[in-house]
Amino acid sequence: MILRNITFLFLAVAFLAGCELEETNINPNDPTDVPVTVLLPTAMEETAENLSEEAAVIAGIFSQYFTGVDNRALTVESYLLDEAFNMNPIWQDFYNGPLNVLNIIIEKSEADGAAHYAGVAKVLMALNLGTAASLWGDIPYTQAFQGGANFSPSYDPQETVYAEVQALLDEAIQDLQAESTVSPGDDDVIYQGDLDRWVKAAHALKARYYMHTIKRDAEAPAKALDAIANAFQSPAESLIYTFGFTEAEQNPWFIYFKNTPYVEIDPFFSDLLDELEDPRESRLIRRSFGLERVGDFYAAEDASVPIITYAELKMLEAEARLRAGEGDAEAALQEGVRTHIEEVTGGIPDEEMDAYLDAHATLSGDTEDHLRTVLQQLYIAHFTQVEGWTDYRRTGFPELAPNPNGENPQNPGGAIPRRFIYPQNERLFNNSFPAENPNLQDRFWWDAE
């Protein structure tokens, strides 16, 4: 059930931004009274958290970045999801968090002529919608966010949601380049009000979501390449959330391994880095007392959360070029891998970099071999991210062996899961809930066989 009441969220905002709230004499219990300058950083932080908390843990187990060793993660390891304990919190984090907040920002901004705020919010709305749809398939959107006026919003087909994602990004690009009564500044804790970078981020996300649909749209790679041409031109333009905006902020992976260390690094991923003699290994994996967990690059207390990066974009460009039959795929791949290695390691000697690229980022063989090389590097770059599982589902790479104990009524056949089930609250309280809760092997629109 999608709720409009987010009282506790804004009480927290009031605590973190008490001075501003007192000075403007607003009611933290009524989000319509909260200015967009307070709502925007909240939506950004919640977006980053949603991309690196329980959804990413489950997706990471399915894509064999992680193995579950205790508590609920041990059950997920056997391809079982609890519709209450696993699914309810993730769904609520999306709908009661950034999706709801961003909807309020868009409505307030459009009413006030603040096109630039609306544009930033639409970029983030598209990101959250696209992520949620990639997890569950059909989701509420057009009838969502109505509070007591509609407690049973209908489910929009995933195909419709993906079209809306692209439409939101197109609108965002227009809004960000339009006249605006006011523009983001320091409250934009990602780009500090740099609207050109938000425009490039919108194009980058367009490319990502086009590539999600390669099984459905033969023109998706060409569309992605068109978007990439207008997206990031350097690593400095990547869309990344840096924790530490307030003293209370800590990286979600840092918190997870401090409080609930229920996963370790899957041997598949660890062995892959060992086999490649990958220079990123010590920063991606932390080894201590016989345990392997996420390393400091992603799980230090103040580590950043990548949302979409220049490195990812160049690897997607390499894939798109191969699928579209265009040249220069190897150059794009090597630029992406070089960038990611430099970011993770802080830099390695030129001869070591050249040797790695020659061995593991050079395209030789047939098209399938080329794709395997590109997607292996994209798999490494997407470590800790939901996109790693999405890449597997849309491409079949890397070639993963399912857990031999993974067959159960929720996951018939025992293959690696293709989707999330819906949460218990939706099944019980949303009268528009689908007739059946799909199992983990029921494929949705873009994951057609």
Image (cartoon, rainbow, N blue to C red):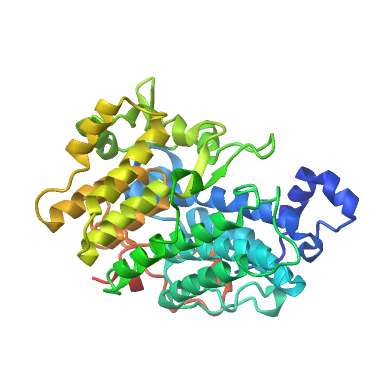
How many callouts does the rendering have? Answer: 0
Which residue is drawn at the image coordinates 32% and 49% (left, top)? 63
Relative image position of residue 196 (x, y in whole percent): 56, 57
The quarter of the rendered structure image containing the N terminus is bottom right
Between 88 and 140, the one nearer to me in the picture: 140
Which residue lies most toward the top here? 289
Query: Residue drawn 57% across and 71% down?
Result: 174
- Horizontal and vertical percent position of residue 357: 23, 37
- In this rendering, is residue 197 above or below 67? below
The reply to whether residue 28 is visible in this rendering is yes
Position of 341 compared to 184: left or right?
left
Instruction: Give the residue drawn at x 46%, y 62%.
Output: 203
In the image, residue 51 sits, relative to residue 320, either above or below, namely: above
Eyeballing the image, is 5 above or below 383? below
Q: In this view, does 3 lie to the left or right of 427?
A: right
Say whether residue 354 is left or right of residue 51: left
Q: Give x and y (percent) for residue 127.
A: 51, 61
Give the percent coordinates (x, y) of residue 168. Answer: 54, 71
Quadrant of residue 91 within the rendered picture: bottom right
Find residue 119 and report its image quarter. Answer: bottom right
Position of the C terminus by quadrant: bottom left
Q: Which of 293 and 87 is in front in this view?
A: 293
Q: Which of the pair 354/136 is nearer the observer?
A: 354
Q: From this viewpoint, is residue 53 visible?
A: no
